[in-house]
Amino acid sequence: MSQAVEGFKHEVHLGRVIYGKTTGGLHKKRKAAPFRMIPRENWIVVENAHPAVKTPEEHAEIVTLLESRRIQPKLARRGTYLLSGLLYCGKCGYSLQFQPKPDGRTLVKKCQKTDAFGNSCTNRGIELEHVEKAVMESLREHEAELLKTPVETGTSEIPTEHLLHTKEKELESLRDWVNRLKDLYVMGDVTKAEYKTRLERLKDLIVKKENEYEQLKESLDGCSPLTHAERLQLIDELKASWTTVIDVKERNRLMKLIIERTEYSRNGDEVNIHVKYR
């Protein structure tokens, strides 16, 4: 949903000002209390802070109407989000997945990693919106730091983009096949035995491709890094993408050129997000 449409859902139009949705910070370089999400019942809501432009009844009707018209982008249904391929568990390092909900929200699923003894990682999920906001805030700080640094001369290359993108597409295709196989089994087009055999084969291929991807990424990590000027140029392109008609896949591509990985961990309402830049 566009930012313009999302604006209609803001409670500021009811004359309210809301404080205390979160507390603490996510910055490694600043001294701050741990980041926490505050339950709505504990928010500070100031009524009649300015003239309202709609009634609570009208607001509820607008939100209901917008949610009923919400159409999930095709790429998002297939698993392409702003942070696709960039979000990892801060506890075990496992890649995290996303789950779209019927009401339009998208969740970061709890970590699916299990060890050799069957013990599951304890990292809980969260709404993707919170993580994206923290990453964008970190990106703004990163840009500010770059602007303070003298501009370098010379250029560098980004050799990772095409090769890694190819591996990502191969993995995406295999995961699509897993979903198709499940559909075939549900519709009765394949037997249970065939389903299990094909599923195991696909899982083996996915593990193989994931290993190839990680090995390629590790081998390319030693390549020439981006200069400050190139980093700033990519950040400018990303910022410009929010004001142009561009799909989430392109924004994700730009994010991958700027960010190496984002690590997320959660203990109760305490959330820690660390962004590692290229």
Image (cartoon, helix red, strand yellow):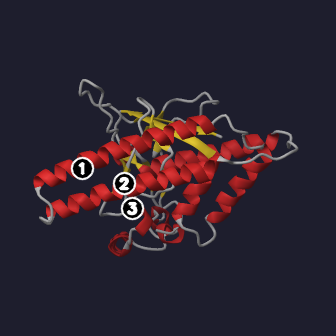
Q: Secondary structure at mark 2?
A: helix
Counting residues from the start of the chain, the first of labels 1 and 3 encountered is 3
Q: From mark 2 to mark 3, how far is it between C-alphas?
A: 12 Å
Residue at the spot x=55%, y=49% of the render?
164
Residue at the spot x=36%, y=76% of the render?
69
Q: Position of residue 188 (x, y in %)?
A: 12, 64
Counting residues from the start of the chain, the first of labels 2 and 3 encountered is 3
Query: Badge 2 is on which residue?
Result: 174
Image check: 157 left or right of 53? Answer: right
Counting residues from the start of the chain, the first of labels 2 and 1 encountered is 2
- In front: 64, or 262? 262
Query: Badge 1 is on which residue?
Result: 199
Q: Report crowding for label 3: few under 14, some 14 to 19, many 20 or more residues within 10 A (C-alpha).
A: few
Q: From mark 1 to mark 3, how far is it between C-alphas?
A: 19 Å
- In front: 134, or 218? 218
Q: Nearer the viewer, mark 1 or mark 3?
A: 1
Query: What's the mark number on residue 78?
Result: 3
Q: Position of residue 210 (x, y in %)?
A: 43, 42
Q: Relative to 71, say whether 85 is above or below.
A: above
Q: Nearer the viewer, mark 2 or mark 3?
A: 2
Q: Secondary structure at mark 3?
A: loop
Q: Residue furthest right?
A: 153
Query: What's the mark number on residue 84?
Result: none
Residue at the spot x=30%, y=49% of the render?
202
Q: Quadrant of residue 274?
A: top right
Q: Relative to 151, say whether 78 is above or below.
A: below
Check disc 2 and give the amino acid type: Leu
- In front: 181, or 265? 181
Q: Relative to 199, say whether 13 is above or below.
A: below
